[in-house]
Image (spheres, helix red, strand yellow):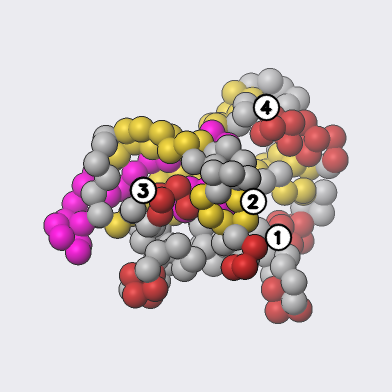
Amino acid sequence: MPTVLHLDPDLLVVDKPAGLLSVPARGADRQDCLAARVQALHPDALIVHRLDAATSGLVLFARGLEMLRRMSLAFEQRMVGKEYLAVVQGHLAHDAGEIDLPLGEDAAHRPRQVIDPLHGRRSLTRYRVLARVGKGAEARTRVALKPVTGRAHQLRVHLQALGHPILGDPLYAPPDQAAHFARMHLHATRIAFIHPRTRIPLTFESPVPF
């Protein structure tokens, strides 16, 4: 069972391990997922947002349809703050900035996403460098990421587009680099929101496992 950071009559916040699906996928061998594990103990728990299987970190569940509606609306209105931490290849040139590049589906290579200036949906990521280490082929940047929009694979594609793929990314990093790491170095480390019933601001954090 994933670690539960918060449990009340309305909400759960859980810490998803890397490699676990958020929801079931096609195929009998892909039914094990975070939602199923949480619902085994809390049948009324409904997942509000998802993380890619390769991403670890905080996921919010609502208990019942009314709480799901309220929290889904909070996400749509960008009233939920999320922060991720990643380690990427190379040294980012700027200490902070925005990546404002539209994303669309790569129809020939699903589930990949691509930068699509003509038909893509606006996608905005803010970043802040935490540390730069190493030189040459071993250069790395540890970076905090705040997705303003919530597109599929947004952080992964935006960093790749800057020329700094996330270490271990099985879709967007060079294959030899991705194979060198046991997991993708992307973690949902913080989530903040106002409780839909009590109206109390809540913030939860998860330590970065890499």
Residue drawn at x 23%, y 49% is 91
The residue at which mark 2 appears reads as 50
Camera-near label (1 vs 3) is 3
Image: magenta residue range? 131-156
Kind of residue sitting beneath label 2:
Arg
Q: Are marks 1 and 2 in contact (CB under 8 Å)?
A: yes
Residue 4 in sight in this render: no
Q: Quadrant of the N terminus?
A: bottom right
Kind of residue sitting beneath label 3:
Leu
| CA distance for labels 4 and 1 | 23 Å
Residue at the extreme right of the image, as rendered: 65
Counting from the top left corner in percent of width and height, residue 8 is at 71, 38
| CA distance for labels 1 and 2 | 8 Å
| CA distance for labels 1 and 3 | 30 Å
The residue at which mark 4 appears reads as 77
| CA distance for labels 3 and 2 | 24 Å
Residue drawn at x 25%, y 54% is 90
Counting from the top left corner in percent of width and height, residue 43 is at 82, 54
The residue at which mark 1 appears reads as 23
| CA distance for labels 4 and 2 | 17 Å
Residue drawn at x 19%, y 64% is 137
Disc 3 element: loop
